[in-house]
Image (cartoon, rainbow, N blue to C red):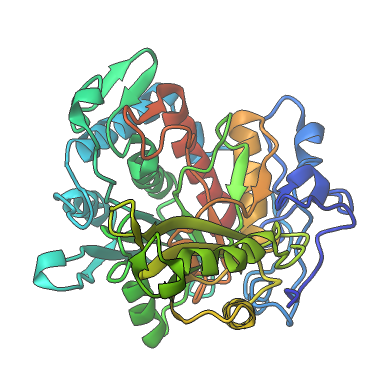
Amino acid sequence: MSLPGRRLGDDHRSDGNLKASDLGKRDLRARDVRGRDLRPCNLRDNRAVSSALPPSPSVDPTHPADDLGGRFRGPYSPLTPTFAAQRDTADVQTRTLALLEQLIARPSVTPDDAGCLTLIGERLEVLGFRLERMDSGPDDFRVHNLWAVKDGSDPSAPRLVFAGHTDVVPTGELARWTSDPFVPTVRGGQLYGRGAADMKTSLAAMVVAAEDFVAAHPHHAGSIAFLLTSDEEGPARDGTVVCVEQLRQRGERLDFCIVGEPTSVERLGDTVKNGRRGSLSGKLRVMGIQGHVAYPHLARNPVHQAAPALAALAAMTWDAGNDYFPPTTFQISNIQAGTGAGNVIPGEVVVDFNFRFSTESTPQGLRERVQALLEEHGLEYQLDWTLSGEPFLTPVGSLSAALSAAIAEETGVATELSTTGGTSDGRFIARICPQVVEFGPLNASIHKINEYVPLDQIAPLTRIYCRTLEHLLL
């Protein structure tokens, strides 16, 4: 099915990536949620940057991501030229780096939090945030969750949520690390440690950005919130998804959300994720009859039977994608069969596969097409499905405009909006928040041995988050 809502323009990219410059061709300038000009006020060439900003959004009642009920629209008034984010760079760097090093030093492998949320909560509580722990899960896999809110002076003004995770993936073979993964180490202009890129740098930057914003604007109109979990890298059953359901049930309002996933590819700010594909996995068991390889007429080889069907699935075009998403993909990840002996025909073959699907396909439609093909090939089979997440999309609007402006102000980079990559907790938050984007540092080293973040990205990331708060909440 096609996603309803305002189209982004005649130009589109079939790979799911949209340059902000492509999106701004039909509009003279971007504005924030109160109608104020988002063009940078302190860059050498404002014209070059303003041309790279997305168009001003219009409320579209057919698409919830664009419909904020008109609550935040108001007369134009320029932003204050004195940004909190213009604080001394060395000071911002020192404070963000200090918090980042404390977070990396806590070995918070899923679902362990190792005290990260306590550390962050203490910093936020000093600023006036109300803290609420939403821990969940069984005793042997207890997940730690934090919801923190600081109200603004205007109840009708928007709320911006910083979301992320404190948990990290396992280190892998320790002998391959140049330094202890849980001892933050500076080397060659990089800070090394597990979680440096994914995503403790973003967490530290978000906290310091909130501190600077509140210090500079103690009577800010909009409210700020944090939604953090220790179960994003794992099964993600008792983390953000549980918090979102609790917030939904009690009617909490979320207007904007920035998830701190590491999205930058070559330069800080070159890529912002404004959506993600859905993920649907299948485990297929094809049954045969075990026997001796010398007597195939007395057996039934499930590998031979399944192979044509698997080839047909791999060759199938599932959809053509659209302006926002690349085409849906099908990938086989594992095939297991046999007893280990070379002279035995296996009795069954087990195949794991995954769809990363666009909004042109639905989970039900994909299931039906797969099952129809298996029936056509006359297989005796069992098929189990796991839906990890539906696709979500935030069309260009107030949040993407504000973040693009903040990136341009801080780095001069023209941001590209993209929906490629894996899943994130943004898929859960999008259920209750109309505008969700993901933005963070370079992702080249995530989940790898010797994970790192460039030192020269730490302060700019903090300032970008702070500038975004200023664009949206003043």
- Given residues 333 and 3, the one toward you in this image is 333
In the displayed structure, 458 sits above or below 39; it is above
In the displayed structure, 398 sits above or below 254; it is above
Q: Quadrant of residue 45?
A: top right
- Given residues 127 and 331, the one toward you in this image is 331
Q: Residue at x 47, y 64 (%)?
A: 303
* Location of the C terminus (image quadrant): bottom right
Measuring from the top left, give residue 99's x and y in whole percent: 26, 37
Q: Is residue 14 left or right of residue 236?
A: right
Q: Is residue 14 left or right of residue 121?
A: right
Toward the top, the furthest residue is 188
Measuring from the top left, give residue 393's x and y in whole percent: 63, 65
How many numbered badges does the structure rendering display?
0
Is residue 95 visible to the viewer in this orientation of the structure? yes
In the displayed structure, 275 sits above or below 446; it is below
Toward the bottom, the furthest residue is 249
* Location of the N terminus (image quadrant): bottom right
Q: Quadrant of residue 374?
A: bottom right
Q: Residue at x 53, y 69 (%)?
A: 305
Q: Is residue 104 left or right of residue 74?
A: left
Measuring from the top left, give residue 275's x and y in whole percent: 60, 60
- Given residues 381 and 324, the one toward you in this image is 381
Q: Residue at x 25, y 64 (%)?
A: 145
Measuring from the top left, give residue 118's x and y in whole percent: 17, 53
Is residue 152 visible to the viewer in this orientation of the structure? no
